[in-house]
Amino acid sequence: MNESLIKQIPLIKDCQEVVEIKKGFSFDEKYLITMQDRNRKLLLRMFRLEEVALKKEEYTILEKMQDYHITCSRPIAFGEIGDRGYMITSYIEGEDAEEVIQTYSDEEQYVIGFEAGRELRKMHQLPAPSDLASWYSRKVKKHQNYLDAYATCGVKVKQDDKIMNFINENIDLMKQRPNVFQHDDFHLGNLIIQHKTFAGVIDFNRYDWGDPIHEFLKIGIFSRQVSVPFSIGQIKGYFDNQEPDDLFWRLYSLYLAMCVFSTVVWTLKTHPNNMDEMLEKVYMYLEDHEYFSNIKPKWYRSDFH
């Protein structure tokens, strides 16, 4: 632990307690800082100096989120100390939604999802930088790179030809799609619940720009496995209680289909020991859609509320 470094950061040098947070896939060092008055808690992230420019962009994103009244960490300080960069934000009190939501009633899970969906809609008001290339051109290029890597990686997904055909038939739908802010990791593991209500969204470090519907694929991979009521609620909340149209489901399915190949490649590269677990998730959502014979997943119920 960088306790000696932490004590050199002006804002928190007189803190009462420092507790390291081990959870998550992020490579940042994360600490819960309790200040002298005990009621004030802050989150400290520390990272390598070569990441400072990237992290500064993330800090700026958090500042912009305040303009849209997003329930997320408030940026407080940013700087460098020793061989580390640091970012200090407010700390959102509560519990990891993924860990506690199953202890609630279906109705409570749905309402939390509904609130999360409304929050996501607000985030998508932030437009992408005007000089950014179109979503279609960036996504197609990225997908092709993943396909090339998948072809030689040694892992084979059942009926991958069927999945590739579905992608090819629908890929042009990405043309002319909006270019907006994407949290890009919006699922139960990055949401906080307090007193059975939605308390905030965390971990903006994977943010991107592009089609807002791409945001929903994390439901199919992660959230739906934990809570179907939440997942339905998120979709309903996002669309203000209206039913999403056919284009939504077709794009949602397209992004899930593309994710088959990126998941295999990314997992092999970053967490190879998790491959069985990740493939289990992939096969779960392939079954949800019967390998994309259906664009609407089996778990979705329009009459659920």
Image (tube, helix red, strand yellow):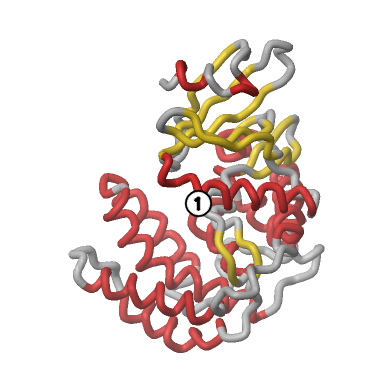
Q: 231 above or below 148? A: above
The quadrant where residue 106 appears: top right
Q: Is residue 10 left or right of residue 7?
A: right
**Residue at 41% across, 55% down:** 281
**Residue at 74% across, 61% down:** 121
Label 1 packing within 10 angstroms: few (<14), some (14-19), many (20+) = few
**Total numbered labels placed on residues in the image:** 1
The quadrant where residue 42 appears: top right
Residue 39 on image: x %, y %: 74, 17
Q: 12 above or below 298? A: above
Which residue does the numbered mark 1 point to in the structure image?
54
Q: Nearer the viewer, residue 299 or 3?
A: 3
Q: Secondary structure at mark 1?
A: helix
**Residue at 53% across, 49% down:** 205
Residue 190 on image: x %, y %: 58, 44
Residue 65 on image: x %, y %: 72, 51
Q: Is residue 233 visible?
A: no
